Amino acid sequence: MSAPGRQVFWVFARRAPTDPFEQVGSVTATSEAIAYVYARTNYRERSWRDMRVVPRDAFYEPAAQAP
Amino acid sequence: MSSTLAFADDLPVAAQETLRDLLLALTKAKQELGFQYASWCIRGPSVEANIALAGMAQEELGHAAVLDGLLGEDMDHPVAGKDDLVGWNRWSASSAAPAMIESWPTLVASCLALDASVTATLEALKSSTYVRLAQRASKMVQEEQYHLLFGVETVRTFADLPRETRLELSAGYQRALAAAETRLDAARTLSRLDALGMLAPGAVKARDRFLQVIAQRFNTACG
């Protein structure tokens, strides 16, 4: 649970353009833009070529349906 | 533009003096940025902001050490000791010592202005005929892109502040930028280097545009 106005973003990155994106962690932020900045500055242990952030809430799963 | 030169010794004396003064001012500004970011890296609004501030502090102090190294290796300027860069007592002993900024929005606006002024100068120096400086400037500008983004996007988080506060913040940015420009004296020194054929054509104007873009982004973010 995050503070009001803040949401969790999952961070994905890859080292080469042909690599698949892999999840490297998450950040909590008030917008996608600041989440991206946090991701870039918080996950610098490797020199990632590309990085993306995705709101965790955007990870869709259909509601369970009765058989 | 003259051909590239590997070492400062190969530069005309006038260019060496101009460059030395500029590098000294840039080094001092980066030390101050490192000092301010480090002072806030356990006081930011979130753990993510704190980690970002800690990383930016390390990068600024790293840049200061690189510039200081150039001054020492190529211009026979005494290299500062590690404690000269960040010791609190060293800062407070100087009459021009920067005070720690106590307000988060003011810190963000002030550091963004100083960072923008320094980075715009490095952007111009990327085209320097003094190759060792040009290479280091390119690397620094690359790392600085996230510092500027951090500043602008953090300003956007101040949207809920009262309009008067945001107007004052915007005015504070302009004051801090004017102070940084005066302190670096980069417009004059870069024009001089340009006249000596040490910069690519248009580098000085590109610096002005760089500063305008950051100011516009700040004002848009400030709302």
Image: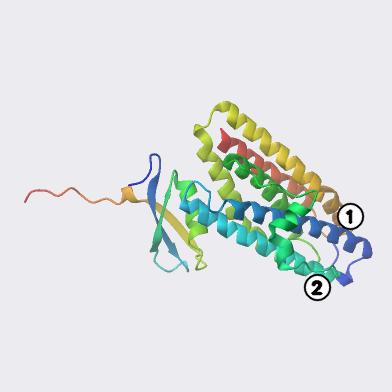
* Residue B60 horizontal side relative to residue B178, left or right: left
Which quadrant does the C terminus of chain B fall into?
A: top right
User: In which chain is the residue bearing label 2?
Assistant: B
Q: Which residue is mark 2?
A: B73
B60 in relation to B6, above or below = above
Q: Alpha-carbon neighbours of circle 2 within 10 Å: few (<14), some, or many (≥20)?
A: some
Q: How far across and down, in percent of the image, does residue B212 sit? A: 69, 41
Q: Earlier in the sequence, mark 2 or mark 1?
A: 2
Crowd class of label 1 (few under 14; some 14 to 19; many from 20; radius 10 Å):
few
Q: Check contact, mark 2 vs mark 1: CB within 8 A.
A: no
What kind of residue is marked 2?
Answer: Glu
Q: CA–CA distance between discs 2 and 1?
A: 25 Å
Q: Is residue A23 left or right of residue B4?
A: left
Colour pattern of the rendering: rainbow
Q: Is residue B10 above or below residue B28?
A: below
Depth order, front residue of A57/B193: A57
User: Residue at horizontal 56%, vertical 38%?
Assistant: B221
Q: Is residue B133 above or below residue A34?
A: below
Q: Which residue is mark 1?
A: B195
In the shown orientation, is residue B134 left or right of residue A61?
right
- Residue B15: give x, y in percent of width and height: 89, 61
Q: Is residue A40 visible?
A: yes
Label 1's element? helix
Could you say whether the residue bearing mark 2 is in a helix, strand or loop? helix
Q: Nearer the viewer, residue A47 or A49?
A: A47
Residue appearing at x 76%, y 65% in the figure: B68
Q: Share a chain, discs 2 and 1?
A: yes
Residue at 49%, 46% in the rendered image: B45
Task: Inspect this view and state whether residue B131 appears.
Answer: no
Q: Amino acid at mark 1?
A: Ala
Q: How many marks?
A: 2
